[in-house]
Image (cartoon, rainbow, N blue to C red):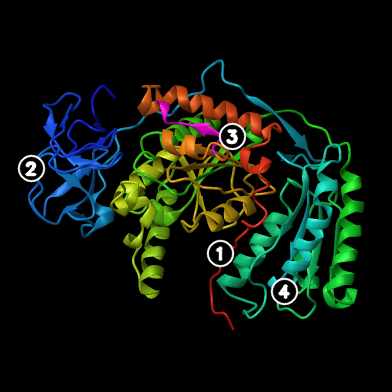
Amino acid sequence: MNGDVVLLAPDDDVAVALRGCDEGTSLAVPGREPVVARHSVPSGHKVALRRIAAGEFVRKYGHVIGVATRTVSVGEHVHLHNLAMPDGVSALASESTVTEVPQAPIDLRRTFDGIVRPDGAVATRNYVGVLTTVNCSATVARRIVRRTEDEVAELDGVDGVVALTHGTGCGMATEGDGWRLLRRTLSGYARHPNIGALVVVGLGCEVNAVSSLMSELGVADHVPVESYTIQEAGGTVDAISRGEKLVRDLAARLVGTRRTPVGVEHLVLGLQCGGSDAWSGLTANPALGVASDLLVAAGGTSVLGETPEIYGAERLLAQRAVRPEVAVALLERIAWWERYTRDNGTTLDQNPSPGNKEGGITTILEKSLGAVAKAGRSPLRAVCGYAEPVPTPGLVFMDTPGYDPVSVTGMIAGGANLICFTTGRGSVFGSRPVPTVKLATNADTASRMAGDMDVDCSPIVEHGVDVAEMGRRVYDHLLDVASGRKSLSERLGLGGEEMVPWQLGAVL
């Protein structure tokens, strides 16, 4: 960090501009001769450190991130106009040299204040959930919550009431991947430890019928559950009134719920990034990777997802698999996504998003190399399907889309009781009934969106703060939030609209 640019690996072909610079600016490069910017280079964007011929691979992070589409001169801005995806993406990943398993420091915090349920499950929040079987009952569920949320949130030991709605539940087959995925997701939310009581609301004539869903929910015996349909209640007005009464009655049964110290082995942390920029792979993602390693070393669980956003870096992750079959399972999911996107007329390299590109990320290879940093250096112990129960403890990969609400929905359905979300462009994501902690990758976003960013990770590049130190700060903040401290998204009331199950299959 002692120059005008950040050099991430000794043999990289590009460096990252710490500040925006004009044409003709001399840029100090750590360990190398200065380079003169041939064009203006925005902050976070790449500048060439050597002449790169057309067709040559370009390296950042010590790995291939793309291929030059034309000759690139020293000091030139490297981005969409001269860098593209190469063929054979997955085969280009260099082998990782990291072999040591992270260890937990002696002075590491190993407990948080959780809510212990009668069956031994541990919650980080205590909510009444209003779960819908079908989109047709979503408005009723939201009206119920709107009319009760203020008074429920004031009750001692109760965090609130949340509408768990979605956009499907009818016009679908009652078999196949789409059906199983929806039922698995709804059941995962219903069984989540953070749901202390549950109301299930249907329309009455949908494919995903209340009676059928209730028979498969598998909610623990200690969780009070009520269900009904709008049609049997007599219509919208009566259904809302009935739901209000049920929510108030159930919330009253949760009053007085207390937290007690429990080990961090009861934490299941979902790792998510959204609105990424070039700083994501340098600051917040590596810091979260450190926090994830600390949690895993102390006996907890971290869940990495967003399969399309590890594309091109999946072999680096597979090298860390504890058994060959775990690596095979991960690579099989990448192959499935290649087929899936091809069948839908697109490719995985359609990612990054416009915002990612504006923030300095050019190719999915570059984005993926930064994204996997969230998973730290811990061994990969398992690969599970979307919304499947997360095996614990250790680092687990869940097959999810990269779209943030869909990805996090799968993680929560699988049992994540804490979400950490890194963002460079800025995100206003929340995930009730599970708290979301947001990490800002750069100082501008941290300042401009201070009301949404829980932790500013920019001091890594702004002030030379060690990644390990920042990761420890993130870890401690996560434990504070798990213990009941409200995240900023919770204070803002976010998270009531972000349950978005992954939809597969035909809409009939």
Q: Which residue is mark 2?
A: 51
The location of residue 461, given as percent across then percent down, is 35, 28
Closer to the N terminus: mark 1 or mark 4?
4
Distance in Å between CA atoms under marks 3 and 4: 39 Å
499 over 34 or under it: above or below: below
Which of the 4 quarters of the picture holds residue 48?
A: top left
Determine if residue 385 is in view.
Answer: no
Q: Which residue is mark 3?
A: 300
The location of residue 406, given as percent across then percent down, is 55, 58
Helix or strand or loop: what does disc 2 sit on? Answer: loop
161 over 131 or under it: above or below: above
Q: Which residue is mark 4?
A: 136
Q: Which residue is mark 1?
A: 502
**What amino acid type should be assigned to the residue bearing mark 4?**
Cys
The location of residue 224, given as percent across then percent down, is 87, 53
Between 506 and 217, the residue placed more toward the observer is 506
Contact between marks 1 and 3 (CB within 8 A): the answer is no
Helix or strand or loop: what does disc 3 sit on? Answer: loop
